[in-house]
């Protein structure tokens, strides 16, 4: 291409930063053209920032789409149910240690997610296990982390009414959520087909270090006993063992909910 630089001269214009702008006259296809060339990086920096803004918007959009799908599948009425808006701010902090532990997940969120850290909330009824999972789940979403909260006895029967394609789509979305909360997984009986399906979800998530939180009324001082109780509640057998082994793994921190009273009994005298 015939392009030659003819001459450069300083213009009277300056960039907003004060740097001079050079006028360059080039001859292109036989015609002279004058170009303004800044002597600073402001324009490059502005373009890079604009590109980053676009990338961030795309990421945000992808996140919102995925999260909307997950909300639609799982929480819709469960989260808004009888308890209304449950958030960390509104909690009674009498048993502050449990709350601080769960809320503390957010302090080191990047590393916790990378390490696949999760909590197993175990203990007596009405102590606030579900409430704390809901609080953390909501905060994760606020932080741009896709999260699904499934109440097992409510959720798994819902799958029965679906066709295969819809069910598979639903299961795949759950598998891939960055964080998954399984509430009361051990409270209900499962058919062998349901157990297989639960196994597939956990089996997918474990090697990818995707945090899978769970809450249950199962509790014991001894971790091996907890695992045994999990297996027996899931219906025993190899699949149940495989689920418990992956779910209750070395990245799970147990939080016990034994002491105190049930919040459900608080108003009764
Ligand atoms: N820290 C808290 N402050 C105020 N209310 C709470 C708190 N924790 C839980 N609650 C309320 O107490 C009730 C019982 O809590 P939640 O459902 O979380 O208990 P749970 O431990 O999951 O019980 P279960 O084992 O029966 O599922 C709910 O209405 C919940 O909103
Ligand atoms: Mg609960
Ligand atoms: Zn400049």
Image (cartoon, grey):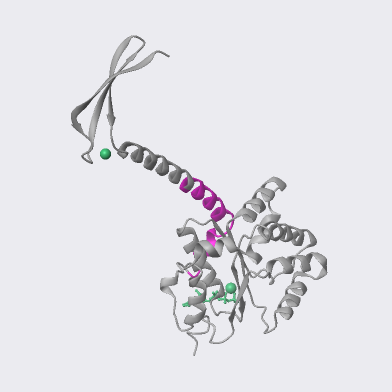
The residue depicted at 74 percent of the width and 77 percent of the height is 229
Q: Is residue 35 magenta?
A: no
Q: Quadrant of the N terminus?
A: top left
Q: Which residues are magenta?
A: 60-83
* Horizontal and vertical percent position of residue 145: 51, 57
Quadrant for residue 151, please give it. bottom right
Farthest-out residue, left: 12
Say which of 70 and 144 sits in front.
144
Say which of 195 and 28 sits in front.
28
The residue depicted at 59 percent of the width and 67 percent of the height is 117
Farthest-out residue, bottom: 269
* Horizontal and vertical percent position of residue 122: 62, 77
* Horizontal and vertical percent position of residue 59: 48, 46
Magenta residues, dominant SS class: helix
Q: Is residue 77 magenta?
A: yes
- Whether residue 161 is visible, yes or no, is yes
In the picture shown, does residue 108 fall above or below 168?
below
In the picture shown, does residue 125 fall above or below 53?
below
The residue depicted at 57 percent of the width and 60 percent of the height is 114
Quadrant for residue 142, please give it. bottom left
In the picture shown, does residue 176 fall above or below 247?
above
86 lies left or right of 245: left
* Horizontal and vertical percent position of residue 83: 49, 70
Q: Quadrant of ligand 2?
A: bottom right
The residue depicted at 51 percent of the width and 81 percent of the height is 263
């Amino acid at each position: 291409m015939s392009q030659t630089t003819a001459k450069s001269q300083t213009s009277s214009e300056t960039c907003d930063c004060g740097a001079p702008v050079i006028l360059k006259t080039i001859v292109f296809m036989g015609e002279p053209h004058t170009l303004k060339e800044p002597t600073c990086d402001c324009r490059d920096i502005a373009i890079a920032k604009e590109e980053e803004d676009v990338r961030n918007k795309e990421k945000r959009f992808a996140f919102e789409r995925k999260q909307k799908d997950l909300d639609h599948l799982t929480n819709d009425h469960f989260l808004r149910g009888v308890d209304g808006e449950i958030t960390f701010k509104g909690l009674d902090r009498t048993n502050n240690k449990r709350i601080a532990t769960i809320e503390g997940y957010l302090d080191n969120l990047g590393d916790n997610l990378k390490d696949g850290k999760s909590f197993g909330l175990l203990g007596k009824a009405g102590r606030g296990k579900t409430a704390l999972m809901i609080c953390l789940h909501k905060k994760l979403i606020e932080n741009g982390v896709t999260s699904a909260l499934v109440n097992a006895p409510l959720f798994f029967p819902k799958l029965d009414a679906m066709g295969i394609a819809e069910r598979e789509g639903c299961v795949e979305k759950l598998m891939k959520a960055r964080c998954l909360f399984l509430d009361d997984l051990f409270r209900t009986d499962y058919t062998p087909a349901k157990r297989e399906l639960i196994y597939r979800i956990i089996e997918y998530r474990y090697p990818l270090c995707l945090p899978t939180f769970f809450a249950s009324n199962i509790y014991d001082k001894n971790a091996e006993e907890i695992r045994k109780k999990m297996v027996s509640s899931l219906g025993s057998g190899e699949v149940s063992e495989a689920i418990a082994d992956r779910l209750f793994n070395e990245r799970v921190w147990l939080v016990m909910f034994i002491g105190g009273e049930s919040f459900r009994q608080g108003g009764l005298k």
